[in-house]
Amino acid sequence: MGARKQFDPTRRRFLSLSGSVLAAVASPFVMSAKAWAQSKTFVIYSFDGVLGRAFKEQVIPPFEQQHGVRIETITMPGSVPPMQKVKAMVEAGRPEADVIPMQLTDYVFARRNNLVIPLGPSDIPEYKNLYPQFITEHGPGLLLWSYGIAYNTRHIKEEPSSWRELWNPAYKGRVAINDPIFEHVLQMVNLTYSGKLLPINDQTFARLSELRPNLLTLYTTGAQAEQLLRREEVWIGGMWNSRTAAVQDEGVPVRFIAPKEGFFVRYNPFCIPRGARDPDLAKTWINYVCSKEPQGLIAEKGYQGSPNKEVVYSEHIKSRLIVTDPNVIQRAVKEDFDAIVDNVADWRRRWDAWKQA
Amino acid sequence: MSADSGREDVKGWVTRGIAGATLVFLVLPQFILLIESFTADNHLTFPPSRYGLRWYGYILTDPDWVGALVRSMVVASVVTPLTVLIGLAAAFALDRGPRRGRRAIYTLLIAPMILPHVVLGLGQFQIAFWTHMQDTLAAYTLAHLTIALPYAIIIIGASLQVFDRRVEEAAQSLGAVPWRAVVYVTLPALRPSLIATAIFAFITSFDEFIITYLLSTRQVTIPIQIFNSLSFQLEPSVAAISGLTLIVTAALSGILIARGQLPGAPQAMR
Amino acid sequence: MVERGWGASSLSSDREEVSKGLWLLLTPAALLYLITFLAPLVVLLLVSFERTTGGVTASSISLQNYADFFSDGVTLRAVGRTLYLSFAIALGCLLLGYPVALSMRRAQGAVRLLLLFLVISPLLTSVIVRNVSWILILGREGLINVVLRELGVSDPPRLMYNDLGVMIGVVHVYLAFVVLPVFASLASIDPAVEESAASLGASPTRVFLHITLPLSVPGVIAGFTLVFVLCIGIYLTPVVMGGNFVVTISMIIADLVRTQFDVGRASAFSVMVLLMVSVLVWAGRQYERRHESPR
């Protein structure tokens, strides 16, 4: 016969092979599903990487046992919730998860589009143990992280104290800054030269252009930032504390400092979408995550600070993270997130224009 | 005469040189990835300080990775033959059909390739969500089929164009019914392009990220799994999955050799 | 020269059957596209008239998104940059890929399959992972720089985090998309034609320039157009290989969806890109038609 017959065996083989592998892999899932048929299922969004694993292995199991539920996690790619999808789902009345940890800018979007339910001290009793500045109307802000300067101690002997060090000509081609959350870069430039975060204008970009000869690259993910530090391609840059701490723990000679002009601290509000299947369980879960032990675990394993006053950090983590010190947290600058969300389109355009220049 | 052949030699060697350098260029990152896949370190550093099968073991036992692998394989295995069949049919219709409107239909058929996947995926998500089909392998299959089909149209179309229809017509004049002439004469001649299409379709489906990501929730495929692990950690698991893909494909190619399905000169001519 | 199909089979009932058969062949593709392509496009078109500010979408219809495409000072520039890169990359793929296709054609059996495997091997690895490898090779502390430094080169040129890096990264993966169509075209050429020309005294170069190359032109155009159009859609590679300094139109669209929650604008920009590329493809097809062998 012609060519068509010759294709069949390969195709059939593919499908039957896949079928048997699928059956083999699926059977444990089917069996465990039967076992779990007794208990309730509760769906939450969770993180990828080390943080997600910390949740899965240490934070989730005690809650499952205590409340007789099974928690199913949906990993958020890049640890960022798919807000467009969430909006579509909430508006259709069927959100896929009951708890959504958001970024502060996502939270503005959620608030303005009425996607999340308000939560108060009666819903989350643990609020009484949290620093009030991290409590939002729709959920507690957990997982504190900060943005400052990371530098390589092998190549830079004197500890920098100012953001202006990034502009130092001695570091030509050895500086990296971030592309995501680029509003930090713009506000940082303003802070350094005018002492105020806003407004972002031509002067901001003029000063940013002066940084250009020093810049090696604008990194896009935390993993990339780590890689740049680890391979010592970059000696100094605007970096996130958690990433720097992770690389430090590998033995790479880097340190994180909070520059004197000011630095940034953000957190993730844990919210419940409108139309969630089990809002009461969601509140119980959030309350649990806020409490001392889970927060302590998250700090140790995930390098994230906690808003809970009662958390006791190990010396090791305290040396690595600046967000463990309440005095330091007070010194962080206050960002206006509504202004950021309003202006980010315009800033992004100018940022893209600056990049292409 | 000797000057001529000298120049011919130089031209021959230049061509071979460019081809050789290009092949090295093509292979270098995969080669490095293959080495990296055997690292026993926690991160991707070059060269690795220790070697082992640690990360291969990880991706073949970790439920997230295995699930992603199975899903990607299943979807790609369905998408590939469908792409070849539907694409062949459409390319044929285009080639043999009326000249008028051909350009428009051709452009329409390859259009999914042109639209940025980000936006196509978003539109597809809306439709899938509306029909309760989001996060299903069936939805992924349809979406991948759509972006793979343009390759079929282009590749098979190009081959059909240079195909000398006189041979097919000769078969017909010898008494063969038109469709038989096509199956026994034209199809074998199209074999290289059909295989090329199958390869492209499989790879397109296996490697497709953004549309699948937009359609997915828990049914994670390999590219999404890689993206998940890479945005948080530069884990060697991604090198291991690359190594696995390379090794498995090499093995499959070996099977193809044994079964005699090499892309070859038109068999009808031999 | 034999006429195209319609003239050869003379019976009109045959012709009708063939015509019906041909339309039937198009049906699966048409059905598929209706659900997975045309319907989403309609949705996108409708959405492109939505205006979103500060994360909230207004309910009124507006053409402002389209106006912004031309007037915001960044998008057109990104489009220009994208077209320039796409052309350079497609050309690079052609110049490097044609010799490879020739070598594949000349090779036999297992060698040919080996070459094929090498050519598509970049596609077997995920795009994100590939770019990570390139950092290890082209980066500041990468393989090449280390070697260059050993050889005494003090200020090695930057092979990455710029336009060149993007070109290297994309040519690397899209080369196969030129090699395969060109190879398929070359493989369909009857060697007897070339052999007879050679036996008549033509030098290998003449045979190549006057017979092989012209006959492979459909494959060349198909490959070039394919790569050119694909390049317009790249949005992951420029991020790593271009150090984020290279901004393509697809990156802008992706960002509008993922971080700015502005689907309306993303849709409008995509419609513009679709129009632009349709024109390019149409132009490519015109050129291809002129090189079609008369039948």
Image (cartoon, rainbow, N blue to C red):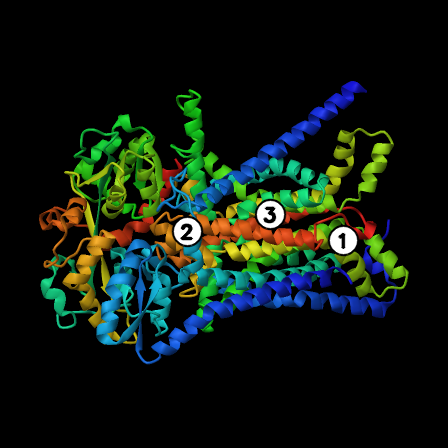
Using the image, tell me which numbered label, if any, was put on residue A71: none
Q: Residue at x 49, y 59 (%)?
A: B120
In contact (CB < 8 Å): disc 1 and disc 2: no
In contact (CB < 8 Å): disc 1 and disc 3: no
- Element type at mark 2: helix
Residues marked 1 and 2, same chain: yes
Task: Indicate the position of residue B266 as horizontal and vertical percent values.
Answer: 77, 50
- Of residues B39 and B147, the one nearer the viewer is B39
Which residue is denoted by mark 2 in the rendering? B55
Q: Is residue A112 visible?
A: no
- Of residues C40 and A70, the one nearer the viewer is A70
Numbered disc in front, either 1 or 2: 2
Chain letter of disc 3 in the image: C
Numbered disc in front, either 2 or 3: 2
Residue type at mark 1: give it.
Ala
Which residue is denoted by mark 1 in the rendering? B189
Task: Indicate the position of residue A336 as horizontal and vertical percent values.
Answer: 20, 52
Which residue is denoted by mark 3 in the rendering? C226
Horizontal placement of B187 versus B153: left or right? right
Q: Is residue C117 above or below residue C52?
A: above
- Element type at mark 1: helix
Chain letter of disc 1 in the image: B
Residue type at mark 3: give it.
Leu
Q: Residue at x 69, y 24 (%)?
A: B10
Chain letter of disc 2 in the image: B
Residue type at mark 2: give it.
Trp
Q: In which quarter of the view is residue A185 placed?
A: top left
Horizontal placement of B263 versus C63: left or right? right
Q: Is residue A286 visible?
A: yes
Residues marked 1 and 3, same chain: no
